[in-house]
C-alpha cells in the first residue's frame, strides 16, 4: 500500500537492504517494512550445498578416465558474493536461481583445473587407484583458488567417488585382472604345493636326523657297554691275576714249607740214621747168628724153626729132598697169628 511492503526471511538467509545505493540494514533472519520504489533487497541463502561433478581427463599413457565426485561448500562472505552475482529479490520472494548454477560451474572448472596436471602424470592403473589423492588435489586447488575466494564461498569437503576408464578399457582391464588373478591363484597353488613338498622334505629330514641321532645314541650305548664290559673283564683279569698271585704266593709258601719240612725230615732221618749207625756200628763186626745166639733168652721155638728155615733157604743148592708136614706149617702159622 502506497509502496510500503513487509518482508520476512528465515534464519538461514542473509539479507542486505539497499536504499538509495546505501546499505540500510544487513543480517540473517530479518523482517522489516521497506519502501519499494527506493529499496532493493539482496537475499543470499547461507546453508551448505552439495554439487556433483564429473569430468574427463587423459592419463600419461593416453587413456581417458572419468572422475566423479562431490563438493560441499558454504557461503562464507555474502557481501563478496552479492558483489559478484545478483541475488536481488524478484517479486519479494524470488531471486535468480541460475546464480548457484554459475557457482557450481565455476567450482567444477576449478576442480578440473586443479587436478588436470596431476592426472596427466599418472598411468591408467595408477590413476584408477588414486581417488583419494585426486580428491586431496581438488580440495587443495579449490581452497587456494583466488577465483573461489572472490566468490566468498568456502569449500568444506571434496569426495572423489569414482575414477573410471572407458567401457572398452574397463573390459580390457577386467580381462587382464582376471588373468593376473588366475596367475596369482596358480602361483598360490604352486607355492602351496611347493610349501607342502618342502614341509614333507623337512619332516623326512627331521625323521632321518632323528633316526641318525637314535642310531648314534645306540652306538654310544653299545660302545659304553663294550667299555664297561672291557673294564669288567680287566677287573676280572686283575682279580684272577691277584688270585693267581695269591695262590702262587701260597704255593710258594707251601713249597718252601714242604722243602723246609723235607729238609727237617731229612735232617731228622739223617740224625736218626746217624744215631742208628752209631748205635749199630759196634755190632757190625758180629755175625747175625751170633747176635741171635746172644738174644737166645728172648727167642721161642717158633723163632728157632724160622732160623732153621732160613738156613735151609740159604743152602737150597745142597738139599736134594725136603719134606715138611702140613701139620707143622699149620701149627707155625696159627701160633704166629
Image: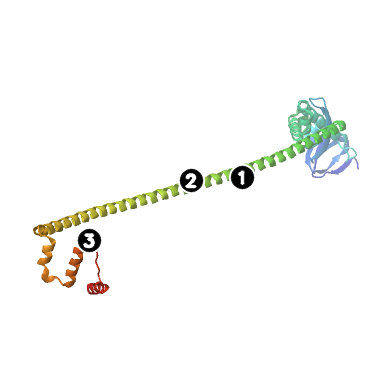
Judge by depth and name the residue closer to the eye, 280 or 300.
300
> Label 2 vs label 1: CA separation?
24 Å
Name the N-terminal-most of marks 2 and 1: 1
Asked if marks 3 and 1 touch (Cβ < 8 Å), the reply is no
Name the N-terminal-most of marks 3 and 1: 1
Q: Residue at x 22, y 74 (%)?
A: 335
Residue annotated with mark 2: 223
Residue annotated with mark 1: 207
Q: From the top left corner, tell me how far across and down residue 258 is, in percent.
A: 24, 55
Residue annotated with mark 3: 316
Left or right position of 231 against 108: left
Name the N-terminal-most of marks 2 and 3: 2
Q: Which mark is residue 281?
A: none
- Quarter of the figure with the N terminus: top right
Q: From the top left corner, tell me how far across and down residue 158 is, in percent.
A: 77, 36
> Label 2 vs label 3: CA separation?
89 Å
Q: Residue furthest left?
A: 282
Amino acid at each position: 500500500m502506497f509502496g510500503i511492503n513487509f518482508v520476512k526471511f528465515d534464519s538461514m538467509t542473509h539479507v542486505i537492504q539497499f536504499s538509495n545505493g546505501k546499505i540500510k540494514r544487513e543480517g540473517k533472519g530479518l523482517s522489516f517494512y521497506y519502501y519499494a520504489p527506493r529499496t532493493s533487497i539482496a537475499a543470499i541463502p547461507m546453508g551448505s550445498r552439495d554439487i556433483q561433478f564429473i569430468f574427463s581427463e587423459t592419463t600419461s599413457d593416453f587413456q581417458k578416465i572419468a572422475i566423479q565426485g562431490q563438493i560441499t561448500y558454504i557461503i562464507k562472505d555474502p557481501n563478496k558474493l552479492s558483489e559478484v552475482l545478483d541475488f536481488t529479490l524478484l517479486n519479494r520472494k524470488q531471486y535468480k536461481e541460475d546464480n548457484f548454477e554459475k557457482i557450481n560451474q565455476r567450482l567444477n572448472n576449478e576442480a578440473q583445473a586443479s587436478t588436470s596436471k596431476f592426472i596427466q602424470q599418472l598411468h591408467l592403473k595408477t590413476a584408477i587407484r588414486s581417488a583419494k589423492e585426486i580428491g586431496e588435489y581438488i580440495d587443495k586447488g579449490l581452497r587456494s583458488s583466488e577465483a573461489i575466494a572472490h566468490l566468498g564461498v568456502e569449500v568444506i569437503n571434496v569426495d572423489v567417488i569414482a575414477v573410471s576408464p572407458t567401457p572398452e578399457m574397463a573390459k580390457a582391464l577386467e580381462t587382464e585382472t582376471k588373468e593376473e588373478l588366475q596367475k596369482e591363484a596358480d602361483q598360490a597353488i604352486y607355492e602351496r604345493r611347493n610349501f607342502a613338498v618342502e614341509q614333507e622334505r623337512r619332516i623326512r629330514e627331521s625323521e632321518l636326523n632323528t633316526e641318525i641321532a637314535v642310531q648314534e645314541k645306540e652306538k654310544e650305548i653299545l660302545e659304553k657297554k663294550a667299555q664297561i664290559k672291557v673294564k669288567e673283564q680287566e677287573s676280572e683279569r686283575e682279580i684272577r691275576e691277584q688270585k693267581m698271585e695269591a695262590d702262587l704266593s701260597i704255593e710258594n709258601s707251601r713249597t718252601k714249607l714242604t722243602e723246609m719240612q723235607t729238609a727237617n725230615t731229612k735232617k731228622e732221618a739223617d740224625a736218626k740214621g746217624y744215631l742208628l749207625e752209631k748205635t749199630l756200628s759196634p755190632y757190625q763186626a758180629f755175625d747175625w747168628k751170633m747176635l741171635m745166639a746172644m738174644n737166645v733168652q728172648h727167642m721161642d721155638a717158633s723163632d728157632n724153626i724160622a732160623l732153621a728155615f732160613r738156613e735151609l733157604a740159604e743152602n737150597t743148592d745142597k738139599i736134594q729132598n725136603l719134606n715138611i708136614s702140613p701139620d707143622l706149617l699149620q701149627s707155625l702159622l696159627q701160633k704166629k697169628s
